[in-house]
Image (spheres, grey):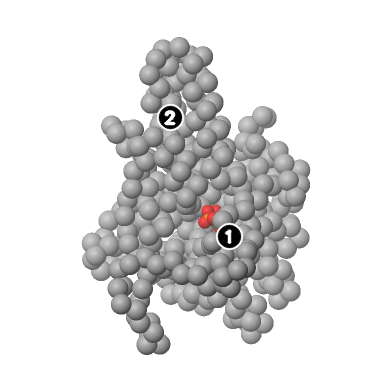
Amino acid sequence: MPQRFSVATNFVNVTVRGRARHYRTVSFDGPHNAVRLIEQRLLPHQFKIVATKNFRETADAIRLMVVRGAGAIGATAAYGLAQGARAFRGRDPEKFSRHVETVFRTIQSARPTAVDPVNAMNAVHAAMRTGGTVEEKQALGLAAAEEFANEDFRHCQEIGRHGAGLIRSGMRILTHCNAGWLAFVDVGSATAPLYAAQAAGKKFHVFCDETRPRSQGAMLTAWELAQQKIPHHVIADNAAGHLMQRGEIDLVLVGSDRVLGRTGEVANKIGTYAVAVLAARHGIPFYAAIPLSTIDWNLKSGLRIPIEERHEDEVLGAWGVASIFRSGLRTSNPATHLCVRVANPSSAARNPAFDVTPPELITGIITPTGIFKPRDLWRHRSELGRTEGGHGQ
Ligand code: MRU
């Protein structure tokens, strides 16, 4: 079944049970006031769209990682704020404003590290403030959420346009976690240059870090690349250094959950810092790709970025479906999702979900307006969309 992606066409093509269709990772169902999401916890084994019916369900979907990835949770938060605002019944602007504040705080607390949800909700909030009546504010909020989602898509396309030049035919590219179209509304950040280079006819190979503990590389990036027909291998996280030492990696491309505009520090999935150290040791270019909603112009130090600590079970165990492996390992029911305990039963675990990479380890930040040295972001802040009192917490 053909799986063509073109940067010029709108939505990513997913083939499920032999049928190719276009999807957005996140979208809004106006008549039902529901946020529609690809249920990412079931991928790559099952493709399912779910709908959250109110803002609390939307916040839960972010917290439980039904939807994940900074851009995707940004768009989900924007829609969730609009959804919560639209559910308000009454005409009193002050009561409406207090209700919206509760919705904002509920969604914001779902996951703390990515700045995109806060930036996205700030944009929706600002649009609502320009309305006179509650009804106007509700309509303006949804329009602003749709605009955030559309801008996320446009930004990813622009990242692809700028980043494709970094990729030459024959390259072997390492990526970490999932910064693909599943992590955004569409296209992806770290994957955008790959898809644009593919559309330009370049041939290259991708290594997906497995990305323990939740295995977004093995489960999501690998699935996405398979959908896009990009040759790839999944590798254990521990294998990256070995491949670099043997000259088998030419470029590293990752995404980010928060880039500090003042310092150039990059927060991303746990393990990114280790990959950056290895890349620097081996002289391999290391790039982070981001839409403008990922920039935090306020924080002055990476040490102040709130790092999410998730449940220890993610480290102590693993999950997937029962399968028949090529090695001959087999289990009985291939359709069942399984959780298995891996670690010693009496041991506890730590599970920081993100880390921070310092600017000296980063070759460049690929943005929708061009590629910048991390420490040059502040100098270019007006072209990168910083407004006084705007983006950031
Ligand atoms: O915990 P996750 O799966 O939400 O983490 C996602 C990542 O770390 C991505 O690399 C990051 O969001 C950048 S791409 C949007």
Task: Work out whether residue 138 or residue 158 is closer to the camera in this orientation and state it.
Answer: 138
Which residue in the structure is indicated by mark 1? 312
* Residue 149 picture location, percent across and down: 44, 41
Picture quadrant where residue 288 is located: bottom right
Q: Quadrant of ligand 1?
A: bottom right
* Residue 163 picture location, percent across and down: 55, 59
Query: Residue, x 66% and y 57% (percent of image)?
Result: 355
Residue 363 in view here? no
Query: Crowdedness of circle 1 by 10 Å Cα count: few (<14), some, many (20+)?
Result: some
Q: Residue furthest front?
A: 346
Distance from Cα at disc 1 to Cα at disc 2: 32 Å
What's the amino acid at mark 2?
A: Gly
Query: Crowdedness of circle 2 by 10 Å Cα count: few (<14), some, many (20+)?
Result: many
Residue 84, numbered circle? 2
Picture quadrant where residue 269 is located: bottom right
CB at disc 1 and ligand 1 closer than 8 Å? no
- 158 left or right of 370? left
What's the amino acid at mark 1?
A: Glu
Which quarter of the rendering shows the N terminus?
bottom left
Query: Residue, x 38% and y 26% (percent of image)?
Result: 87
Residue 375 in view here? yes
Q: Secondary structure at mark 1?
A: loop
* Residue 193 picture location, percent across and down: 51, 61
CB at disc 2 and ligand 1 closer than 8 Å? no
Query: Residue, x 30% and y 77% (percent of image)?
Result: 332
Residue 212, numbered circle? none
